[in-house]
Amino acid sequence: MSAREAFLWGSIGGLAPEVLRWFKIAATGGAIPQLHWLLYVVFLVLYVLIAGLVAIAFRPDNAWKGLWVGASLPALIAVLVQSAPKGPGPG
């Protein structure tokens, strides 16, 4: 799979959970959250771009793996944050 394809599938995977969240809100008739829409869109675009870049780094060999990497990005970030090394200091 080329880097361009990995980026595309990872980006789609990164967008999928958010699309599902909005679909669930619409399907249940829930109220639309009060958001600062411009800021929301900016962060969503950044998140989708990061999901695509992470998919390139993982070098998936098929589209399903690219989607998986993009969709599981929040879990990957959580693991990285929990296991981040401590900075230099006493001790």
Image (spheres, rainbow, N blue to C red):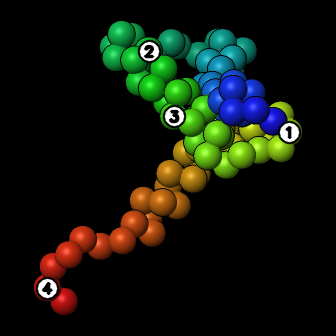
Three-letter code for the amino acid on which mark 1 is drawn: Asn
**Spatial CA span between label 4 and label 1:** 46 Å
Residue 73's place in the image compared with 15, above or below, is below
**Spatial CA span between label 1 and label 2:** 28 Å
Residue placed under numbered mark 2 in the picture: 41
**Spatial CA span between label 3 and label 2:** 14 Å
- Neighbor class of circle 2 (other Cα within 10 Å; few <14, some 14-19, many 20+) is few
Of labels 3 and 1, earlier in sequence is 3
Q: Residue at x 44, y 15 (%)?
A: 41
**Spatial CA span between label 3 and label 4:** 34 Å
The reply to whether callout 1 and callout 2 are in contact (CB within 8 Å) is no
Q: Position of residue 61 (x, y in %)?
A: 83, 44
Say whether residue 4 is visible. Answer: yes
The reply to whether callout 3 and callout 2 are in contact (CB within 8 Å) is no
Of labels 3 and 4, earlier in sequence is 3
- Neighbor class of circle 3 (other Cα within 10 Å; few <14, some 14-19, many 20+) is some
Residue placed under numbered mark 4 in the picture: 90
Q: Residue at x 67, y 49 (%)?
A: 58
Of labels 4 and 2, earlier in sequence is 2
- The numbered mark at residue 62 is 1
Residue placed under numbered mark 3 in the picture: 50
Three-letter code for the amino acid on which mark 3 is drawn: Ile
Of labels 1 and 2, earlier in sequence is 2
